[in-house]
Amino acid sequence: MTMRERLASGFESLQSFGLVLLLVALPYSEGLKNTAIALAFLGFAGKTLLGRMPRFQDPALAWALLAYVAACFLSFALARPELQRPPELLTVLMTTSPFFLAADACSRRPSRALLFTWAILIGALLAGLAAYGSFLTGYQERLSLASIENPVPAAEYLAIALGVSLALLIAEYRAGLAGPLLVLATGFTAVPLVMTRSRGGLLGAACGGAAIVAASLRRRRYAVVALVVVAGLVATFALMHPNSRLFMGRNITARFDTWQRSVELIAERPLTGHGPGIYWALGVTYEDHKGEEHQLNAHNTLFHAAAENGLVGAGALAAFLVLALRAAVRSIRGARHAVGRAVAVGALAGIVASIVAGLTAVSTDAEPGMLFYALVALGATRHVMSVPPSETGTRDGGAR
């Protein structure tokens, strides 16, 4: 190996290290998150300059996300001058970068998908433990995470992580070390998720669980049965607690009103939108007898994208979401062993959870968005490991 190749390998390792640090730090350290992105990008840039060009197992996904990013830049260029905010373009790049960084890293060494998956789970476990302890000793009405202070995006993050954790737990529950650790990760993700009291996150987690059932069982109708059971439990809870904020509340009406106002904003500038990251500045408010409430986002991922970046941006994002689901399903079908399949199933569950949560919130923004984009890259990684560590000598994940 030449000196140039050694340097390229070193930068590539730095890229992976930065990604691991990012996925662990996402829910509880803003400073560490920024440092991790810088390290990962430095590694990516260094190995690219040395001739090791980026590669993607699913180029269609990369092109769709690049189209979305390009639409954000176009929207910025054509926005009214008072709505042009250059820092928002940096935010777009930071939020979407985990996909490109993780997809490139996994394309060269697919086993990194499992490494990044464990980084997600360790981050969720540590953040869940810290948040649970803080909640018990504080006076919050709803749980949040250290660097995700709003309970709604905190719930989105936890719903995505819970799907990943459950899928891996099903595959590794008998493992001596991984099994107990996954039980802890699942428990300290699920309990804080419930304590966020966020409708979107809880519904997303339920649908993510149904996706796991659909992907894990040969008879797909069991997934429908699982959803019916969840719906029955929700209905029972609603009848026993008719005044619960999960089913009643001013913000439900506010969401419908905001969606209607978002459609009007889209009609004003249908192709390129009003500019990335400026929904909060468009003057959308909801008013009733309790007063006026300023709406900071569209409470729907695609409405939000269309209002800010036009139908061009929303269309590119929608295409990316569809391709993400397709890529995860293909990875599940092509997996050669249990652990690799579990990573793909967990990615599918997390993607479904994010999309469902995005029906009533903006789930592709900030920390939940960064986790989502990274998870799409992991879901698109095929043949996650050539030889699973706990199944040496078997070909397709048989009994241990």
Image: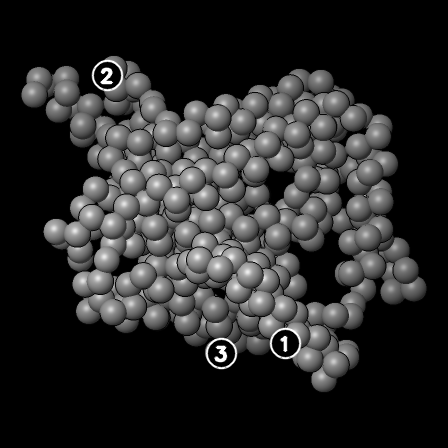
Residue 264: image tag = none
Q: Amino acid at mark 1?
A: Leu
- Estimate the spatial distance between the alpha carbons at disc 1 and disc 2, rounded to whole Å: 56 Å
Image coordinates of residue 160 in percent, x first then y, are: 49, 55
Q: Amino acid at mark 2?
A: Leu
Question: For residue 188, what is the image quadrant?
Answer: bottom left
- Point out the frontmost of discs 1 and 2: 1
Instruction: Give the structural element (helix, strand or loop) at label 2.
Output: loop
Question: How many neighbours does mark 1 have within 10 angstroms: few (below 14), some (14-19), or many (20 or more)?
Answer: few
Residue sitting at 77 percent across and 61 percent down?
A: 251
Q: Residue furthest right?
A: 289
Image coordinates of residue 48 in percent, x first then y, are: 29, 19
Dot placed on the residue nearer the N-terminal end, 1 or 2: 2
Residue 50: image tag = 2
Q: Nearer the viewer, residue 384 or 291?
A: 384
Residue sitting at 20 percent across and 23 percent down?
A: 8
- Apparent side of residue 49 relative to residue 78 in the rendered image (left or right): left
Q: Residue furthest bottom?
A: 240
Residue 136: image tag = 3
CB under 8 Å between callouts 1 and 2?
A: no
Q: Quadrant of the C terminus?
A: bottom left
- Apparent side of residue 195 relative to residue 239 in the rendered image (left or right): left
Dot placed on the residue nearer the N-terminal end, 1 or 3: 3
Question: How many neighbours does mark 3 have within 10 angstroms: few (below 14), some (14-19), or many (20 or more)?
Answer: few
CB under 8 Å between callouts 1 and 3?
A: no
Question: How many neighbours does mark 2 have within 10 angstroms: few (below 14), some (14-19), or many (20 or more)?
Answer: some
Q: Which residue is mark 1?
A: 233
Dot placed on the residue nearer the N-terminal end, 3 or 2: 2
Q: Amino acid at mark 3?
A: Leu
Q: How many marks?
A: 3
Image coordinates of residue 107 in percent, x first then y, are: 31, 31
